[in-house]
Amino acid sequence: MQEPEITEDLIAAHGLTPDEYQRIVQIIGRAPNFTELGIFSAMWNEHCSYKSSKKWLRTLPTDGPQVICGPGENAGVVDIGDGQAVVFKMESHNHPSYIEPYQGAATGVGGILRDVFTMGARPIAAMNSLSFGEKDHPKTRQLVHGVVEGIGGYGNCFGVPTVGGETRFHAAYNGNCLVNAFAAGLADADAIFYSAASGVGMPVVYLGAKTGRDGVGGATMASAEFDETIEEKRPTVQVGDPFTEKRLLEACLELMASGAVISIQDMGAAGLTCSAVEMGDKGGLGIRLNLDAVPQREDAMTAYEMMLSESQERMLMVLKPEKEDAARAIFEKWDLDFAVVGETIAEDRFLIVQGNETRADLPLSELSSAAPEYDRPWAETPPAEPLADVPQIDPIDALKALIGSPNYAAKQWVYEQYDSMVMADTVRGPGRGAGIVRVHDTGKMLAFTSDVTPRYVRANPKEGGKQAVAEAYRNLTAVGAKPLAATDNLNFGNPEKPEIMGQLVGAIKGIGAACAALDMPIVSGNVSLYNETDGVAILPTPTIGAVGLIPDEDALIDGQVREGHVALVVGETAGHLGQSALLAEVFNRADGDAPPVDLDAERRNGDFIRARRDWITACTDLSDGGLALAAFELAEAAGVGVVLHSAETHELFGEDQGRYLVACNFDQAEALMVAAGRAGVHIETVGRFGGQDVNYGGVSAPLEELSALYRTRFQDMFG
Amino acid sequence: MKAAVIVYPGSNCDRDLAVAFERAGAEVTKVWHKDTALPAGLDIVGVPGGFSYGDYLRCGAIAAQSPITRAVIDFTHAGGHAIGICNGFQVLTETKVLPGALMRNAGLKFICKTAGLRVATTDSVFTRAYDDGQVIHLPVAHHDGNYVADPDTLKALQDQDRIAFTYTDNPNGSVADIAGVLSENRRVLGLMPHPERAVDAAHGGTDGAAMFRAIAGLVAPA
C-alpha cells in the first residue's frame, strides 16, 4: 500500500503543531514517513506525554515511608505491612465514553484493571467517579444508562467488586461527560513487576487478544476538543472483552509466579507503540519489532494501523529466554495468543519491520524523553464574587430539595448494577462513604474513596484542590482507616487557554499542599485535558482516589446509629454557604468563595477520630449539604429519626471543612467532649438520634416520607 | 467431606465457594474446565458463579458443552450431590440437570443487592438447617436470574416440593418468585443467590453458613 504523503494537513490531523513537526525532523535528521509520524503523534499527544501538565505534576509530593513505587509506572504501590502492598490508580476514559458510552466506560474499567495487574497485583476493588450533564439534557439519560451498564458489564464479568464512587450532574458536563475509573490490587511487596526492560537480545512477547483496527488514533482523539463532527469519531472507540481480560489476569499472574517475566507493560493508549517505547526507554535499550508476528484479527493491516491500534486486553512482556516454553504453555492453558514479536537491542533504536521492510527506524529514547514540554501561560483564577445574602429557608423543604435532586438522591439505581460483593471480602459496599474490603485471609482491611467538589475548584482552584484531598482523608478517617496515599485524576478543559491552565495550576498547588500536610502522597494519576465542546469547558474536576488501611477489626468504624444516640459534630462550624450544595440545588446560585480548608485542623480532627474510635459507634464526614444532609443520611441508613437543635440555614447547610458527625451513647459523648477539650479539638452536641421524624430546629417530617423520596428519586428520573 | 469446585476460565466465585466449603470443614479440590474427570471419592461438586466462557451467548450455554461439565452431569446422574450457584445454576439448567431456564432480569439490568428468601422446603441436605418458611438474607448478583419454567414443570416442582427458596421481594421477575430449585432426587440444588457471600460476620450476614455446615455434616462419605 502506498503511504500517504506528509502534508501540513496530515501533520495537523495528527495533533502535532508545525513546531513539533520541525522538532521531529531535527531529531531524526529527515522527514518522517507516515508510520513514523503516527508513532510520534502517539507518543507526543497530551494523553501520553503530559506535555502541558508535567511541569506542575512534578511539584506534587510523591514520597513517604509507605511508598514502594510512586508515579511513572502503570500504578502506584504502597506498603500495607506484613510484606503486602496495595497497588492502585485512577484513570479517565472521558472522550470515548461520551462518543460510545457502553464501550467507552467498559474499556476504561478494563484499562485500569490491566494497569493494576500488570504490576503483579490481583485487583480487589474498583470505584468510579462519574460526571454527567443536567438531568434534562437530551444526551444525559443515554449516557447514564450506557456508562453504568458498561462499567458493570466489564467489572462484573471480570470479577472485581465495585465498592464506591460518585455520580454528579451539572450543566458544564453537557458536552463532555467524565468517566474516571479506579482500581486497586493486592500484591506481595517483594513481587512487584515493572516496565523497564533489561538485557540485550531478550524476547519481546505479545500476549492476550489479537490486534485489530479498533481505537487507531484514540489517544490523539482524547487530546482534542469536541465539535459537531464527534459522531465521526465513533470508530476510534475500542471494544472491551472482559472474559479475555479475566483470562489475561490469571495467565499473567501465573506467568509472573513462574519467574519468567523480566518486564511487563500493558497496551493501553497508543497500544504497541507506547508499551514498547516505555519498556525500552526505562531499560535504556532499543526494541526491534517484527509486525508479521503480531497476532492479527483483520487482514492487510498496515504498520501504521498496528502501531496505533488500541485493541484491548493485550500485554507486552520481556521474558527470560530459557522460560519461553513454560510461558507459552501457561498462555495456551488460558487459550490466549502468545507470540514472540521482537527483541531488545543494544542500539537506541525503535525499529519496526514488516514484510522484510523497515517501516520505522527512530531513536527510541528521544521518542519519549524529547517529547515537548510546555510551560503554558496561565492566569490566576480571579477571586470569587462575594456571597450575596442567603435567605433563611424551611430546613425540611431545603433537605427535600437536596435529596430530591439527582446529585444527592440515593444512587442504588447506579450501584446495584455493579457486583459489589464478588470475592466475598466486601465489608462495606457503595452508598455509605468509603468502601471497605478485607485483605483476604488477614484481619486487615482497606478503605477506598473518591472525592472532588468541582464547584469549589471552579470558584477557587487552590482551596478546591485542597478540599478534594481533605474530603478523601475524612471519608477514610470516618471508617477508622489511616489514609495511606492517593491517586489524582485531573480533568480540565483546554490548557492552551490561560484561564483553564490557571485552574489546573491552582488545583495542583492545592492538592500538593493537602497531600503533604495529610501525609497522603500521590502515587499514580492521570491527566485528561481538552474536555471542551464548542469551546465550553467542564467544571475543573481533579478527582482524588484515596486508600486507607484499617489494621484490624477493632479499628473499624462501621456501626449504625441507634435510638437515643447523641449527635456530635467534631470540628468548627462557621456556616460557610458560598458554593454550597444548598445554593446550587435550592437557589440555583453559584456565588461566594469555596470553603477554606485548614489542613492543621483536618489532621488534628482526623487523628482525634481514630484515637477515640472506641467511643464512636457511627461516623460520617460533613461535606456537600453540610450537617443537614449528613445527619439525614446517617439516620436514614439506620431507619432511626433525628433531631437537630439548630434551625439556622448556615449552621444546617454550611459546608465548613474539617468536620465529622459522630453518633454514640451519652456516656461516650461525655468522654469524647472531655478528650476533645484536652486535644484542642472543637466538638459540640448538635442533637440526638431517635423517634420516627427528621426534626431540624422544630420543623419536622416523617423519616419514612423523606426516605421514600430519597430512595426513589433517582430511579424515577433515570430508571 | 470432599468437595470439588469447577473452574471455568470465566468463573469468578470459585475461590469464594471453595472458602465457604473449607470453612464448613470440607476438603476442596478445584477442577479445571479442560479436565475430563472429577476426583475420586467426591461427596459434592460445586459449580460456581461467574461468566463461565464470557457468556456472550446464552449464560452457561457454552459451559454446558465443556468436557468437565459432562463429568458433572454423569456424577449427578449417578446420584452425586451438586450445588450450582448463580452462573452454576444457569449451567445446570442448560445441561438439563435441573429444569427450567434463567432469562434476562425483568428490569433488564444487572442487579446486586441483598435479597430476602423464604425457605420453601427443608427436605434436602442444603436446606435442612433452616426452618420451614424461615426468611433468610443472601446477596444476589446477576443479569440473568429470571427463572422460567413451563406450567407442567412448575406444577411438578410444586407437587414434588422441589422449590428450595423463593424471593420475599422478587428482584428479577422469576416465575412463582423462585430463587432455587432441587433435582428430582433432591441431591442437586441450583440457586441464583450467593450463600458463599454470607458465611462470615464481616459479610454483614451469615445466613449462608448454615447451608454449608449442613452439606458438610450431612453428606455421608462415599
Image (spheres, rainbow, N blue to C red):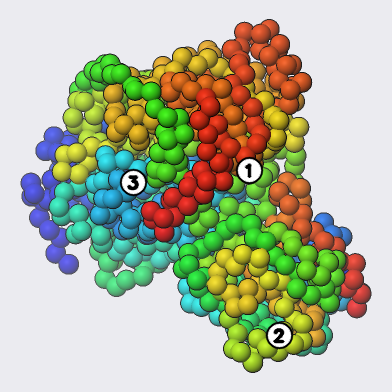
Q: Are marks 2 and 3 on the same chain?
A: no
Q: Chain of mark 2?
A: B
Residue A612 left/right relative to A206: right
Find numbered disc 1 in the image and state the secondary structure of the residue it sits on.
loop
Q: Which residue is mark 2?
A: B157
Q: Chain of mark 1?
A: A
Residue at 59 percent across and 12 percent down: it is: A682
Residue at 41 percent across and 19 percent down: it is: A576
Find numbered disc 2 in the image and state the secondary structure of the residue it sits on.
helix
Above or below, A693 relative to A276: above
Q: Amino acid at mark 1?
A: Gly
Residue A671: image tag:
none
Residue sitting nearer the eye, A355 or B20: B20
Residue at 44 percent across and 18 percent down: it is: A575
Q: Position of residue B198 (x, y in %)?
A: 73, 56
Q: Chain of mark 3?
A: A
Residue B116 left/right relative to A702: right
Gap between marks 3 and 1 measured at Cα: 30 Å
